Image: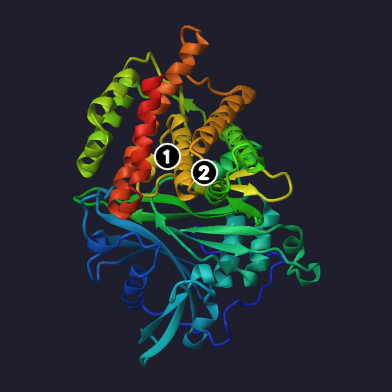
């Protein structure tokens, strides 16, 4: 949210001017010390809170570094949490910045803001305060759950000009009383703002004319543009219609104090984004798991799986084309530089998961042989912005209508620092990620026919090749000699190495978190290595 209040800005006539807080809501805030004392145990129980276990912040270490009060009773807070265990920090000073909007309410009103089916306490907390002279309890409602916050947020984006659709931003302000917080939260909080089912129930003309919207509240903040906001806005402005259309977004600015005599730094980032919502769509992973489990080889189910995989490949190529056209390309790493980084990751995986070497004969030698093939290439294709965490769980297939694929969640791997997630990379990395996801769909769906997986993977790759041809986008490889066959061979070498890297990373993840699933990446590693050996 912009760091100046919006309460002095005249509100559009189409937005209700009355308070959205309860009539019993108090007017005096607890002190920051009282707020932090209550927020600390509450945040530790939230799924979006990133510091768990040994990394949990020391007791009493939280501090408020920025506060905005866009309207009475609404505050948007940036809270700094000290990382208890800094072994894998990615933050030089060990601080993690958290986005916590809150709305001041009467204690007895707190539970009225809960969403059915969500984890207990997600909607807010009680705070004991002495700011009114004698100890009393007030409620701090999590901003995502309170209509007053979303009305203030929408109006602030209009004032700041961070909108692609003024009507959409006004629709958010109008329909805030109908908000629905989604369950199953991960690193952020998502809120559905449905369109009225009956035009007579509309709260304004924009509410009536705008489709369903979803707002993602970003919980962990780092200085710089958030890729999920930056890339979706760029893709929408390029005219690509396979991303939910961004309607409005917000930025937050704060001052980070310099240490050891260093000057204070002003930092900013995106804090929330609202997009059009795709209400009738299948999750990509669930869809392909179902197709795998019901495969009929030569029947309509197999045919549909192949058609969907090919269309997804085309969609992926379009995504890369529009990202390159909108945000440009840059010099890629040299083959030697890429091989060096992949070798480092491979050594890490082999050390973390001893079962790898025991299960796959001569694994280290085979990995090295692939790295040598990579190093022998003359050059790599230009780098550009990519999705960065591309798999079947990041795509939706529209039910009815044009039955298009939609691509979601451009944040990249959430555990990587923001600066790394925003670096240009090879488009083939996204392709490798999706290919690995088909392996998981085959395993989880228990595909009864062994040829399902290679057939679906081939269809996706063919769709991607056709999509690149149709868009006239980046060539699969530099092909300095002009030999298309050589160009394709070079591309396959790069893709093999990136898929191998992804499978090795998966092995580490599964060994740590789901040992029963370790067989999936092990089989994938063997398949990738054997495919290249045959080629």
Identify the residue shown where x is 35% and y is 28%: 529
**Residue reaching furthest to the bottom:** 134
Label 1 residue SS: loop
Label 2 residue SS: helix
Q: Position of residue 380 (x, y in %)?
A: 41, 20
Residues at discs 1 and 2 in contact (Cβ within 8 Å)? yes
Reading the image, the residue beneath label 2 is 230
Q: Position of residue 395 (x, y in %)?
A: 56, 46
Q: Position of residue 461 (x, y in %)?
A: 53, 29
**Residue closer to the observer: 7 or 484:** 484
In this rendering, the answer to whether 399 lies above or below 14 is above
Q: Earlier in the sequence, mark 1 or mark 2?
A: 2
Identify the residue shown where x is 20% and y is 40%: 351
Q: Which quarter of the figure is the C terminus placed in? A: top left
Q: Position of residue 12 (x, y in %)?
A: 70, 64
Identify the residue shown where x is 24% and y is 49%: 88
Q: Residue 83 lies in what quarter of the image?
A: bottom left
* Residue 432 seen: yes
Identify the residue shown where x is 43% and y is 18%: 490
Q: Which mark is residue 422?
A: 1
């Amino acid at each position: 949210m912009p760091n100046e209040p919006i309460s002095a800005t005249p509100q559009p006539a189409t937005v209700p001017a009355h308070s959205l807080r309860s009539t019993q809501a108090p007017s005096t805030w607890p002190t920051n010390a009282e707020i932090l004392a209550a927020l600390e145990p509450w945040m530790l129980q939230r799924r979006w809170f990133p510091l768990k276990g040994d990394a949990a912040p020391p007791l009493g270490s939280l501090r408020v570094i920025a506060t905005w009060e866009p309207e009475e009773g609404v505050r948007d807070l940036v809270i700094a949490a000290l990382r208890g265990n800094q072994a894998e920090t990615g933050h030089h000073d060990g601080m993690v910045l958290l986005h916590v909007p809150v709305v001041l309410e009467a204690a007895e009103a707190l539970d009225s803001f809960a969403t059915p089916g969500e984890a207990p306490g997600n909607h807010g907390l009680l705070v004991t305060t002495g700011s009114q002279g004698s100890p009393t309890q007030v409620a701090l409602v999590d901003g995502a759950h309170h209509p007053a916050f979303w009305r203030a947020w929408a109006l602030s984006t209009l004032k700041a000009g961070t909108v692609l659709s003024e009507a959409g931003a006004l629709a958010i302000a109008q329909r805030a009383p109908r908000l629905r917080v989604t369950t199953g939260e991960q690193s952020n909080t998502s809120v559905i703002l449905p369109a009225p089912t009956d035009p007579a129930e509309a709260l304004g003309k924009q509410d009536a004319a705008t489709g369903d919207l979803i707002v993602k509240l970003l919980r962990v903040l780092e200085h710089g543009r958030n890729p999920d906001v930056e890339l979706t806005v760029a893709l929408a402005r390029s005219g690509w219609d396979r991303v939910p259309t961004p309607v409005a977004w917000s930025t937050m600015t704060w001052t980070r104090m310099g240490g050891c005599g260093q000057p204070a730094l002003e930092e900013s980032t995106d804090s929330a984004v609202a997009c059009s919502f795709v209400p009738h769509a299948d999750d990509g992973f669930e869809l392909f798991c179902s197709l795998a489990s019901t495969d009929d080889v030569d029947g309509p189910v197999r045919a549909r799986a192949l058609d969907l995989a090919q269309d997804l490949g085309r969609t992926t190529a379009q995504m890369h084309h529009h990202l390159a056209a909108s945000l440009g390309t840059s010099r890629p790493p040299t083959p030697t530089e890429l091989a060096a980084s992949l070798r480092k990751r491979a050594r890490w995986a082999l050390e973390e998961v001893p079962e790898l070497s025991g299960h796959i004969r001569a694994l280290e030698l085979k990995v090295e042989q692939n790295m040598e093939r990579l190093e022998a290439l003359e050059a790599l294709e230009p780098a550009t912005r990519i999705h960065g965490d591309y798999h079947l769980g990041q795509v939706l297939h529209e039910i009815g209508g044009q039955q298009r694929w939609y691509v979601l969640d451009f944040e990249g791997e959430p555990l990587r620092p923001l600066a790394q997630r925003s670096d240009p990379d090879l488009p083939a990395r996204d392709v490798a990620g999706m290919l690995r996801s088909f392996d998981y769909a085959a395993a989880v769906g228990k595909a009864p026919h062994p040829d399902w997986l290679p057939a679906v993977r081939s269809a996706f790759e063919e769709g991607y090749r056709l999509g690149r041809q149709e868009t006239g986008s980046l060539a699969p490889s530099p092909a300095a000699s002009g030999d298309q066959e050589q160009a394709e061979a070079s591309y396959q070498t790069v893709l093999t190495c990136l898929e191998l890297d992804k499978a090795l990373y998966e092995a580490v993840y599964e060994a740590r978190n789901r040992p029963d699933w370790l067989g999936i990446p092990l089989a994938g590693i063997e398949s990738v290595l054997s495919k290249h050996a045959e080629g």
